[in-house]
Structures are given as structure tokens and as C-alpha cells.
């Protein structure tokens, strides 16, 4: 069971991993904590945004929209690999997912199929939204893929987790396809190598 790190420690963990980080607005206090608890933490979830343009993408992830208020994640990873911090605390990114998947993440074992949505993921996962159209054709630059691995590794390093604590939204919630354009097993290999 992992207590969420402080916002300041989160920032330092990302910077210590060699990432370029931009702090957006009052990100340290920008959260959805009034909607329920945040923690204990069990993993890192990777998403794609279905947007283009970094400035627009960051603004959407910070503000959200009427049906889904922001923040929509903790950090937005741009095409150039910059991590824009948009919130800290409970964020509207994971939604409800599979309790069997959560148990596998906690045990750091192979993931079962996600076939139900019965567990609050916003409570238990750090979330990174990655700027991409999510159509399977929009490219994933190497700088961005490397930054995704470093961001996930930064959180795993702090909590002493392995790459098995990193999942894609598509592995958590039935019907989700993100991140689309690279296999999560490949990303976990990158996280494993980064942790070495």
C-alpha cells in the first residue's frame, strides 16, 4: 500500500529522471479530491489525448469539459517529451475499471483481460495523458516515447515498483483503446530498462 508522494516530491522525481517539466497554473492544488479519496496508490496509467497541438492539449487536460471536469491527468507528455504538470491529487483519467486488473498490478503479475468496470481507478493510479490523435497513424516521436518511459519510471522508482505497475488505459477499462500506436509490453520494457 503506497501513500501518494507530495506534489513537490513528484516534481523532483520527474526532474531527477531527466525530464523537462513545465508547471501549469496551480497544478499542486488542482484536483478532484472532493469527489473521493486519493490513494493508496498502486500504479501508473498511460493514455493518449485524441488531440493535436501542445498548448490546446494541455489546456484541455487542465480544464476538462463540462461533462468531465479537469484535471484529466497529472501530467501531459507532449510530442517533444516535455511533461506539463496540470494537476495533483484525484484526477478524472482512469474511470472505473477491472478489479482483477488492479489485483494483478498490486501483485505485479501478468494482467488478466479487463472485462468489467467495477473499481475506481482515479483513486489508485497516477495518470499521464500523451499528446496524440490516437488514430494509429499519428506518429509517436522517440522523444515522447522516451519521456513516457522516464515519467513512469520516476513514479515506480519512488514507490519501489517494477515496470509491472505501469498499464495502459486499454488494459484497465473495457472498450478503451489508449494508448494506440505502440504496444504496452514494449513500453514496460522501456520502463524496465530505465529503472536499471
Image (spheres, grey):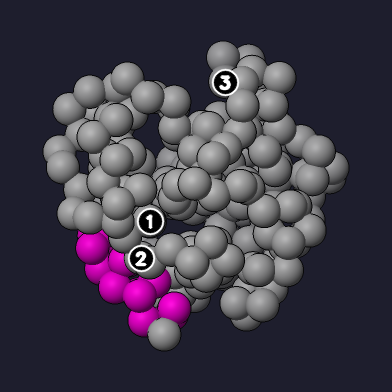
* Quadrant position of residue 15: bottom right
Distance (Cα) linking label 1 and label 3: 24 Å
**Is residue 166 shown left or right of residue 176?**
right
* Quadrant position of residue 10: bottom right
* Looking at the image, residue 176 lies above or below residue 84: above
Q: Which one is earlier in the sequence, the residue at label 2 or at label 3?
A: 3
SS under mark 3? strand
SS under mark 2? helix
Residue 153 shows in this picture: yes
* Looking at the image, residue 85 lies above or below residue 151: above
Disc 2 target residue: 163
Q: Does the segment drawn in magenta span residue 192?
A: yes
Disc 1 target residue: 166
Counting other residues with Cα less than 10 Å from the Cα at mark 1, is it few (<14), some (14-19), or many (20 or more)? many
Which span is picked out in magenta? 182-195
- Furthest toward the right, the residue is 26
Counting other residues with Cα less than 10 Å from the Cα at mark 3, is it few (<14), some (14-19), or many (20 or more)? few
Disc 3 target residue: 68
Residue 48 shows in this picture: no
Asked whether disc 1 touches disc 3, contact meaning CB atoms under 8 Å apart, the reply is: no
Amino acid at each position: 500500500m503506497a501513500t501518494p508522494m507530495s506534489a513537490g516530491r513528484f516534481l523532483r522525481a520527474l526532474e531527477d529522471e531527466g525530464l523537462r517539466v513545465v508547471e501549469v497554473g496551480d497544478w499542486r492544488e488542482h484536483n478532484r479530491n472532493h469527489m473521493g479519496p486519493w490513494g493508496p496508490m498502486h500504479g501508473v496509467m498511460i493514455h493518449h489525448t485524441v488531440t493535436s497541438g501542445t498548448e490546446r492539449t494541455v489546456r484541455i487536460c487542465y480544464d476538462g469539459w463540462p461533462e468531465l471536469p479537469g484535471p484529466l491527468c497529472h501530467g501531459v507528455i507532449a510530442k517533444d517529451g516535455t511533461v506539463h504538470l496540470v494537476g495533483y491529487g484525484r484526477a478524472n483519467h482512469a474511470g472505473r475499471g477491472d478489479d482483477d486488473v488492479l489485483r494483478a498490478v498490486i501483485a505485479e503479475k501478468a494482467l488478466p483481460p479487463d472485462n468489467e468496470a467495477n473499481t475506481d481507478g482515479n483513486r489508485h493510479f497516477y495518470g499521464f495523458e500523451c499528446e496524440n490523435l490516437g488514430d494509429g497513424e499519428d506518429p509517436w516521436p522517440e522523444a515522447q516515447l522516451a519521456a513516457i518511459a522516464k515519467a513512469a519510471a520516476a513514479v515506480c522508482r519512488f514507490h519501489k515498483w517494477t515496470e509491472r505497475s505501469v498499464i495502459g488505459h486499454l488494459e484497465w477499462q473495457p472498450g478503451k483503446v489508449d494508448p494506440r500506436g505502440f504496444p504496452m509490453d514494449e513500453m514496460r520494457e522501456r520502463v524496465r530498462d530505465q529503472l536499471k
